[in-house]
């Protein structure tokens, strides 16, 4: 993820890992990577990032969000992903990697998400121009 954040290999990152449940059943894991140079002494580095989550904290730190890129792939889960999401045999996952950029064009967060494909519909509305 360091390359997506334009960081050197020895730069530190804050890592936030979450697992989401639907009716008590795991359906998604998401791991965010934020440059430590941005988030080290902020609430982002705490277990609870507070109301509005890390995007609200990034904006409070002066990193007004401008745009996101997303890469989505459908694939069979890795063994630990199948275990973590308690997937039935043969259920694929969506693997989504989102990068958030501030108004200066700096990548400020990469979120690596794995979703059980039987729990989600990916629906997008895009401008024609």
Image (spheres, rainbow, N blue to C red):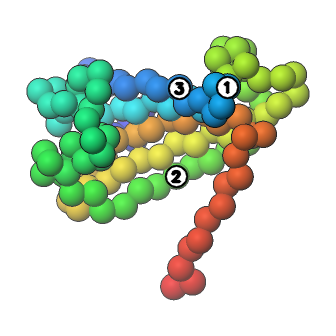
Q: Which x, y percent locates residue 70?
A: 52, 52
Residue 117 falls in which quadrant of the image? top right
SS class, disc 3: strand
Please tell me the numbered disc located at residue 70.
2
Q: Residue furthest right?
A: 90
- Residue 17 horizontal side relative to residue 38, left or right: right
Residue 58 falls in which quadrant of the image? top left
Against 47, is 22 above or below? Answer: below
Q: Which x, y percent locates residue 25?
A: 67, 25
Q: Earlier in the sequence, mark 3 or mark 2?
A: 3
Marks 1 and 2: in contact by CB < 8 Å? no
Marks 3 and 1: in contact by CB < 8 Å? no
- Residue receiving disc 1: 25
Q: Nearer the viewer, residue 52 or 75?
A: 52
Q: Nearer the viewer, residue 105 or 17?
A: 17
Local crowd at mark 1 within 10 Å, few (<14), some, or many (≥20)?
few
């Amino acid at each position: 993820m360091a390359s997506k954040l334009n960081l050197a290999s020895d730069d530190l990152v804050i890592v936030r890992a979450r697992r989401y449940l639907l009716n008590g059943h795991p359906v998604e894991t998401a791991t965010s990577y934020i440059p430590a140079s941005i988030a080290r002494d902020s609430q982002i580095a705490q277990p609870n990032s507070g109301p509005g989550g890390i995007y609200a904290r990034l904006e409070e730190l002066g990193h007004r969000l401008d745009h996101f890129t997303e890469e989505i792939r459908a694939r069979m889960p890795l063994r630990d992903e199948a275990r973590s999401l308690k997937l039935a045999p043969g259920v694929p996952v969506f693997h989504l990697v989102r990068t958030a950029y501030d108004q200066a064009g700096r990548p400020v967060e990469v979120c690596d998400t794995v979703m059980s494909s039987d729990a989600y519909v990916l629906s997008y509305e895009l401008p024609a121009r």
